[in-house]
Amino acid sequence: MERVSTWPNDPWNIYRWHIHEHTGTHLDAPLHRSNKDSADLIPASHLVGPLAVVDIRRKAAADADAELTLDDLRAWESQNGRLPAGSIVAMSSGWDAHVHSAKFRNAASNGALRTPGFHIETVEFLLAERDVKGIVVDTLSLDRGLSPDFPVHARWLGSNRWGLECAANLGELPPRGATLVVGGPKIAGASGGPSRVFGLLQ
């Protein structure tokens, strides 16, 4: 933040922001990995929907390279019913607990990141068989950290859908029943940006 003016010496307190779009809890617009819509073109109605929280915390605690697989999703549906139309699917890996430590990036000695993410087969199933608006992770990436070519980003964002990364407190929400509201940035041409996100319970 660069200070532009200072009250009371000036009429206002004003800062100029210098922001990296993809830091903190943030939206990945389709444009981030394709030539599809920028953040401002995502309709507000596409940023609100019934939330399905798929809990892979036990698996992720044992294996930092864990992925939300199709088996995980099918297990969720066997317990909670079919994903509702217009839903948003979140991976709850418990990784947000590490946000204030080096464990959040979990970088190996060669610089490779070791963090959970969605499996590409899960994404292909959601695209072909379910009506899903967006996917959410509590890690740095929709793909697992070790991914060399980011297939989940490419396939999901390339379908003109959005993703959300670095979400917090997913473990406090029920598997089904919450509504997610994503306050995405409405900045022309943006590939994403920091967002305020709410899980609403009735």
Image: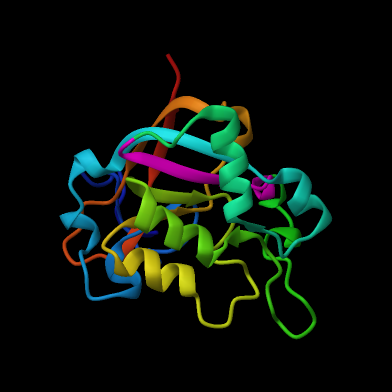
Q: Is residue 154 above or below residue 60?
A: below
Above or below for 138 versus 199? below
198 sits left or right of 95 in the view: left
Q: Is residue 202 left or right of residue 76?
A: left
Residue 51: quadrant of the picture: top left
Rendered-image quadrant of the N terminus = bottom left
Is 125 inside the magenta-drawn segment?
Answer: no
Quadrant hosting residue 53: top right
| Residue 128 in the image, given as x and y percentages of width and height | 36, 57
Residue 107 vs 138, above or below: the answer is: below
Q: List x then y, in percent, for residue 160.
A: 26, 62
Q: Is residue 12 visible?
A: no
Q: Residue at x 39, y 70 (%)?
A: 155
Is 141 on the left-hand or right-hand side of 155? Answer: right
Q: Is residue 70 visible?
A: yes
Q: Residue at x 37, y 39 (%)?
A: 87
Q: Quadrant of residue 66?
A: bottom right
Q: Nearer the viewer, residue 58 or 129?
A: 129
Q: Does residue 200 sit above or below 92 in this rendering?
A: above
Question: How many labels sit on residues?
Answer: 0
Residue under the image location 19 percent in, 67 percent down: 189
The outermost residue toward the bottom is 110
- Between 91 and 187, the residue placed more toward the observer is 91
Classify the position of the C terminus by image quarter: top left
Task: Tell me where residue 39 appears, x and y as whole percent.
Answer: 24, 58
| Residue drawn at point x = 43 percent, y = 69 percent | 153
What range is drawn magenta here? Answer: 85-96
